[in-house]
Amino acid sequence: MKVKLIRYTPEPEKVVAMAAKSCHTVDIPKMEGMSEKEIKAIIRITRDAGHHSVMEHANFTFAIEDVSRALTHQLVRHRLASYSQQSQRYVNLEPLEYVAPPTVLSNEKARERYTEVMEYIERSYHELVELGIPLEDARYILPNAAHTNIVVTMNARELWNFFTLRTCMKAQWEIRTMAFIMLKQVREIAPTLFDKAGPACLRGPCPEGEHECAERMRKGLLKGARK
């Protein structure tokens, strides 16, 4: 898995603070006249008050490679985002690269069976293409595990929602791993905007009910995303 923050709104925290401040001033305030202390204070006040619409003015674009189709099927459910994904209609996926879950890799028999099936699929895909079957039809036999690449753009408000849902220990392992990497990267750019971002249990009761994972999360699992 490769995840890289490739573009973002310049000075995103200043933009968000200016937008928030403009709601209470006669004229649009100038960003150049805002101090770091004022910017942080405005962001924290508006964020904690639930005035999250101002966060939509800051956008972040990620280039994500070598993740599974199973992951991107979950990712695109986050509708307030823009996506550009590698097309299986036009890209020949030979050799077939794929994701193997840790539960499979840790079980020798399961790993052997999994590899055997993937190799069979790859051979069959190759045979169909050799027989003149269009890629858009040959792809029907490709697995959810097949590698894919995707470019994703989300604003800060949607990223907050994404991190709330996908850094939770109840989220599927692959997208959770990706979410923590994304969270670490945006925190380096906008630490005040995202200092409380993460699973809901970090900010209050766990919406999933009482789980041991919530306590482990509070004790420092999220700390790894801050390093």
Image (cartoon, helix red, strand yellow):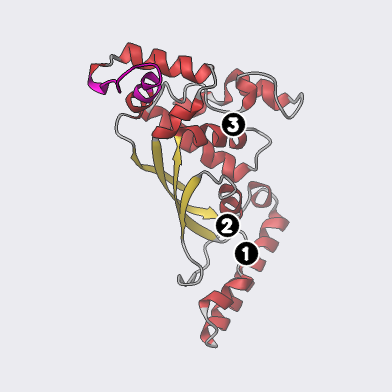
Q: Nearer the viewer, residue 25 or 135?
A: 25
Give the quarter of the figure containing the C terminus. Answer: top left
State yes or no: residue 21 in magenta: yes
Residue 171 location, quadrant: top right
Name the residue carrying label 1.
143
Tell which tag, 1 or 3, sits nearer the viewer. Answer: 3
**In the visual, does 211 lie left or right of 223?**
right
Q: Local crowd at mark 3 within 10 Å, few (<14), some, or many (≥20)?
A: some
Among the two numbered marks 1 and 3 on one chain, the one whose residue lies closer to the N terminus: 1
Among the two numbered marks 2 and 1 on one chain, the one whose residue lies closer to the N terminus: 2
Residue at 25% across / 21% down in the picture?
A: 30
Query: Residue 35: x, y in percent?
Result: 28, 14
What amino acid is found at the position of numbered circle 1 in the picture?
Answer: Pro
Query: Residue 223: x, y in percent?
Result: 52, 23
Element on which disc 1 rests: loop
Query: Residue 194: x, y in percent?
Result: 46, 25
What amino acid is found at the position of numbered circle 2 in the picture?
Answer: Arg
Name the residue carrying label 3.
164
Q: Nearer the viewer, residue 165 or 49?
A: 49
**In the visual, does 102 lie left or right of 97?**
right
User: In this view, which residue lies farthest toward the left?
Assistant: 32
| Residue 69, numbered circle | 2
Residue range (magenta): 17-32
| Residue 211, numbered circle | none
Q: Nearer the viewer, residue 196 or 50?
A: 50
Disc 2 and disc 1 in contact, CB within 8 angstroms:
yes
